Amino acid sequence: MTHEVKDILDTTGLFCPEPVMMLHGKIREVESGEIIKVIATDPSTQRDIPKFCTFLGHTLLEQKESNDNYLYYIQKK
């Protein structure tokens, strides 16, 4: 699946709660409907990022693993 990504948030090497805190800041920087790609290495993001999206009403378009990374495509509400 291809997404038109507006911005990339690389949280490689960071651990909970930093990736979600950084996502909070990054999502404020983009317009409604735009897509952010998040790259993470912390397995807890598999739980935390979907919860973040559900709680704040953003759309998690795709979540996948690639090599040792977790990739998320989030569309701002």
Image (spheres, rainbow, N blue to C red):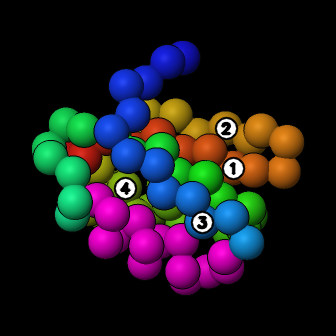
Dot 1 or dot 2: first in sequence order is 2
- Tell me how far mark 1 sits from mark 4, CA to CA: 16 Å
Q: Are marks 2 and 3 in contact (CB under 8 Å)?
A: no
Q: Are marks 4 and 3 in contact (CB under 8 Å)?
A: no
Which percent across, then down, holds residue 7?
A: 38, 46
- Tell me how far mark 2 sits from mark 4, CA to CA: 15 Å
Residue appearing at x 21%, y 51% in the figure: 30
Q: Nearer the viewer, mark 4 or mark 3?
A: 3
Query: Of 45 and 51, which appears nearest the observer?
Result: 45
Name the main secondary structure of what is drawn in magenta: helix
Q: Which residue is mark 3?
A: 11
Q: Which residue is mark 2?
A: 64
Q: Residues within 10 Å of mark 2 (few under 14, many from 20)?
A: few
Q: Which residue is mark 4?
A: 53
Which percent across, then down, holds residue 45?
A: 62, 64
Count the marks: 4
Q: Are marks 1 and 2 in contact (CB under 8 Å)?
A: yes
Mark 1 lies on a secondary structure that is strand
Dot 1 or dot 3: first in sequence order is 3
| Residue 26 to residue 65: above or below | below
- Tell me how far mark 2 sits from mark 3, CA to CA: 15 Å
Residue appearing at x 33%, y 39% in the figure: 6
